[in-house]
Amino acid sequence: MSRTTAPAPADRKDGATAPAEGLSHGLKQRHLSMIALGGVIGAGLFVGSGAGIAAAGPSIVIAYAISGVLVMLVMRMLGEMSAANPASGSFSVHAERAFGSWAGFTSGWAFWFLLCVAVGLEGIGAAKIMTGWFPGSPEWAWVALFMLVFCVTNLAAVKNFGEFEFWFAALKVGAIVLFLGIGVLAILGVLPGTDAPGTANLTGEGGFFPHGTEGLIVGLLASVFAYGGLETVTIAAAESEHPVQGVAKAVRTAMWRIALFYIGSMAVIVTLVPWGDKAVVEKGPYVAALDHLGIPAAGQIMNVVVLVALLSAMNANIYGASRMAGSLVARGQGPKALGKLYGGVPRPAVLVSCVVGFGCVLLSYWSPDKAFIWLLNTIGAIILVVWFFIAASQLVLRRRTEREAPEKLVVRMWLFPVLTWVALAGMAAIFVLMAREEGTRVQLYYTGALTLVLAVVGFVRQKTAAGRAS
């Protein structure tokens, strides 16, 4: 049998092994490396980071550095578990192996819901850019077009998804690298027509912490959620040519690249542009910085980059949602019809994920102040819940793997278990900070309610299954 048709070890109902049965293995290492960046580098970085800068001022660099360290720890833990047991369900499979099917059910379906809503949000953002270029055209039509294109892309062989994501992510990375290069030249005063700003923007207008620790906290919360999406690479690893080596390398390279792009970008922006400049929020920090340097057509250039970023994230999230749903079904935790494979692709899961994503878009038109806001609040802290499951699972599975199959630990968490506990403490601190801040408290409550409901349903299903087995 060929490499792409031979059945792989299944995501069994006990969560014991790796990729979902029958998934193809068409992703190459270069695909994995870019998929790791594709899901995380989106409008949150290019546009949304402006709100964090407005709240924290220059100290946004510290906020992104702190949250970046937390993300590095989480990804190292996830990389360890995924290299030891590659699975299309990623952290959901690991949580199931560690704590039982209820944990896999809870974390998996919560993440699927997050990705579906994110697909809708990215579609709305991309449509707004298109209607700016084509006034009078309906936003929903653009969203429908994008959804159709990426639905077809994801229905085809996985290598087609990988190629789309590779080039999308490459354009985003190229844009950020170019921005960082121009910014560094301007900071050094060697860019034609610019003078070195020195530390004027870092220490002026209220100093490095213009809004004190409260501003830093708001910036920290904003930065934490900007990093969400890196988890997709461990889902994709199950469909790569060499899952173990692929996920190990992709996780290692993604961590330092994300740190460089996020923290480096924030440092360049707040050094070049006064943090209080309204354009940082209104136009986005990247456009504000390019305008400040007198770069021609900066706004349109960044609109193209943001559009590519949104479409890339859309593509990656449809893929991640479909594979997570397929894995859950393969483990007996969802409707069987969703898990059927056609040509190595869970096409029903792709279609349902796209339909749910487009449904979120329709809600934004039909009930923007009620149903849509409810959706946004519900997904507000899901990524933190997922990270918590990752860290808790790693605590359990690391010791189990050391006893049963130590040769599988090709990626190891640093200073285990100390840094795992540090990461858990960091997440607990962020939950507390969210409860303190009025703007994030509601999100925490809604996400908590969703997580509790899923956990109860998952626990009942686990008990029912155990009763039948006995």
Image: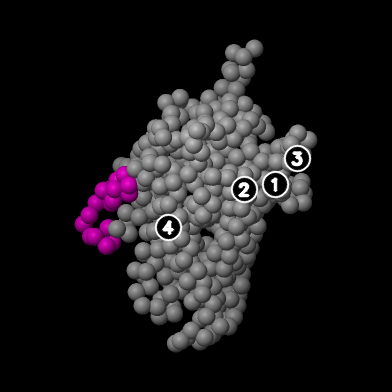
* Cα–Cα gap, marks 3 and 2: 16 Å
Instruction: Give the CA separation, mark 4 to mark 2.
Output: 22 Å
Q: Can you tell which quarter of the image residue 469 is in?
A: top right
Task: Give whichever of discs 1 and 4 has the lower sequence position.
Answer: 4
Disc number lying in front (4 or 2): 2
- As drawn, the label of residue 245 is 2
Q: Amino acid at mark 2?
A: Gln
Contact, CB < 8 Å: mark 3 with mark 2?
no
Instruction: Look at 50% across and 28% down and name the residue there.
Output: 329
- Residue 54 lies in the magenta stretch: no
- Residue 316 lies, in percent from the top left, at 45, 48
Q: Which mark is residue 410?
A: 1
Magenta stretch bounds: 131-149
Residue 216 drawn above or below residue 81? below
Q: Residue 360 in the image: x percent, y percent?
A: 37, 42
Q: For the residue marked with disc 3, what is the amino acid? A: Pro
**Type of secondary structure dominating the magenta stretch:** helix
Image point (61%, 19%), residue name: 463
Residue that carries the numbered disc 3 in the rendered image = 406
Above or below: residue 427 compared with residue 184? above
Q: Earlier in the sequence, mark 3 or mark 4?
A: 4
Q: Residue tagged by mark 4?
A: 167
